Each structure stands twice: as structure tokens, then as C-alpha cells.
Image (spheres, grey):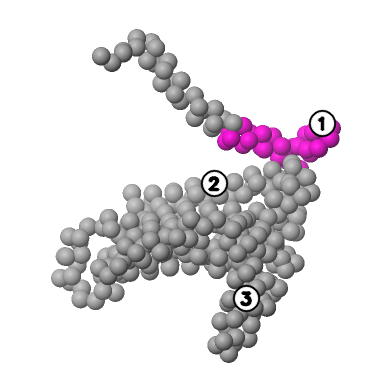
Amino acid sequence: MPIRLPAIKQRHTKFFFLLPAVIWMFAFTIFPLLSSLWMSFNNVKIVGPDVFIGLRNYARIFGDYYVGNSAKLTGVMVLVTVIIQVTLGLVLALVMNAEIRGRRYFRTIYSIPLFATPIGMGYLGHTIFFEEGGPLNIILTSLSFEPIPWLSHPFWAFIAICMIEVWLATPFCFLVLLAGLQGLSEEVYEAARLDYTSEWQIFWKITFPMLQPVILIVFLLRLVGALRILDTVFALTAGGPGTATEVYSLITYRAAMKFFDFGYGAALSYMLLIVVMIITLLSFRKMREIYE
């Protein structure tokens, strides 16, 4: 027969099983969050006591040229990559949602980049975009094009990072949008085919409006994720040439881990957190207004 514990012990037992998760959450989420928040209001010193300086670290952000430049660069990079990722993901989802031969294998192939690490792809990019004998430039020269200075020219370094980011994140958009497509009612399409004969009309009048909430969610998730871009840039260009690819997260990393200005680095991190929270709240509020 199963052993039944008294009611009081049963109530205490469930808290015992929750305790490891609570300890983990406090040790690796809540405590670092509160500790870094306190650091952002201090001049943190490696040797000696910290000095409380209030909002000076935050005020310093708005007068820092490098922060402003990196914020603009990050904004452009995020918009370019996220728009391409969502668009390609939608196209692939539409193709893979159709009855084509071998689509299971194609879905698996398209999902492979999800298992690649951004830092690894950044280092691999040194080989792919190598200017003297790299695979891309070999292909270009074989087609009678001039080799491209991928990592030594500001514009092409920006393009190289965008290409890797698109390759890494498009499968996520593809899988979520494919799931959204497969969740649409087939009865609606049967009725739509009585009014529309063109597949483009069915997509524009039926599929796109019904899929729009999923597209917006995917766009928002990728927007928030792309704002934290660091690994690819750190490994591939380290912010160069010059400051051409010095994104916001790289500025934050250098402030704290290279120049040991931990208070300023924490303030930069929280400023990014505030921006992400504002974007998220405004986006969800707008979506509620549209779809409620």
C-alpha cells in the first residue's frame, strides 16, 4: 500500500521540492539583478569601498558620443536583420506548408542553424569572409566579380555581421510562422477559394490577416533578442574596422570588463533593459488595441 503522509507534512513537502528552483532563481537571477542595480548608482572600485554617486552614471550615458553612435548602429542593424529574418521566415513557412515532396527533410535542414552558437559562427566568419582566398571571394572572382573587403571596410563588415545574424535567427521565425500557418482553419480557405482564384489574393486577403498576430509576436521577440547582439560582433570584427560595428552591448562589455568601470557598465545595461521594456509594453498595448 502507498504511504500517505499527514496533511501538514504534505504541505511542507511541496515547498521542499520547490526549494532548489527558488534558490537557483535567487542566486542567478534576482541577486545579480539587484546587485547590478545598486552598482549602477555607485562608483565601484576594485580596491577600496564603493562611492555612491546617484544618477551620475546614467547622466553620463547621454553625453557619451560612443554610446550614441553605438545606439544608432545597433538600431539600424536590428531593423535590417529582423525585417529580413521575418520576411525570409515567412517565405520559407509558406513554401514548407505546401504539399511538396521531401518537406520533412527540408524542415530539418532549415532548422540546423538553431543549433549553432553565435560566438562560434562569429569565429567561423573569419574563414568565410577572409579577403585573400576566403570561400565567398573565391566564388565572386570565379564569376568575374571583384573580391570584397568584407572585414576591412565599414559597410561590408556591417553586411557580414547582418548575414550571419540572418542565417542564425531565420529558422526561429520559420518554425514559429510555420506553426501559425498550420493552425489556420482549412474551412476558411475552402470558402475563400469560392471568391478568389489567385493564390496571391488568398494570401493577401486571408492568410496574411489571420497570421498577422503571429508575425507581430515573432517580430517583437526577434527585435528584443537582436538588441542584445554581442557574440557575433565580438568574435568577427571586435567592433571594427574602427568603430564601424561597435554595437551597444559591446560598449557595455568593454566599460565593465575591459576598463573595469563596473558602475557605468551596470548603468548601460539597465538603460538597455529600460528600452527593451518600453518597446515590449508599447507593442503589447498596441496589439491589445488592435485585436481585442
Q: Amino acid at mark 3?
A: Gly
What residue is pinned by disc 3?
134
What residue is pinned by disc 2?
277
Residue at x 53% of width, y 53% of height: 225
Say which label, 3 or 1, has the lower sequence index. 1
Say which label, 3 or 2, has the lower sequence index. 3
Mark carried by residue 90 = none
Identify the secondary structure beneath mark 2. Answer: helix
14 is within the stretch colored magenta: no
Q: Is residue 218 above or below residue 206?
A: above
What residue is pinned by disc 1?
49
When asked about the image quadrant of residue 4, the answer is top left
Identify which residue, 144 or 210, lies in the foreground.
144
Question: Residue 76: image x %, image y %?
Answer: 59, 65
34 is within the stretch colored magenta: yes
Residue at x 66% of width, y 58% of height: 234
Nearer to us of marks 3 and 1 is 3
Q: Which residues are magenta?
A: 28-57
Marks 1/2 in contact by CB < 8 Å: the verdict is no
Residue at x 74% of width, y 59% of height: 66
Identify the secondary structure beneath mark 3. Answer: loop
Say which label, 1 or 2, has the lower sequence index. 1
Nearer to us of marks 3 and 2 is 3
Marks 3/1 in contact by CB < 8 Å: the verdict is no
Farthest residue, direction front: 1
Identify the secondary structure beneath mark 1. Answer: loop
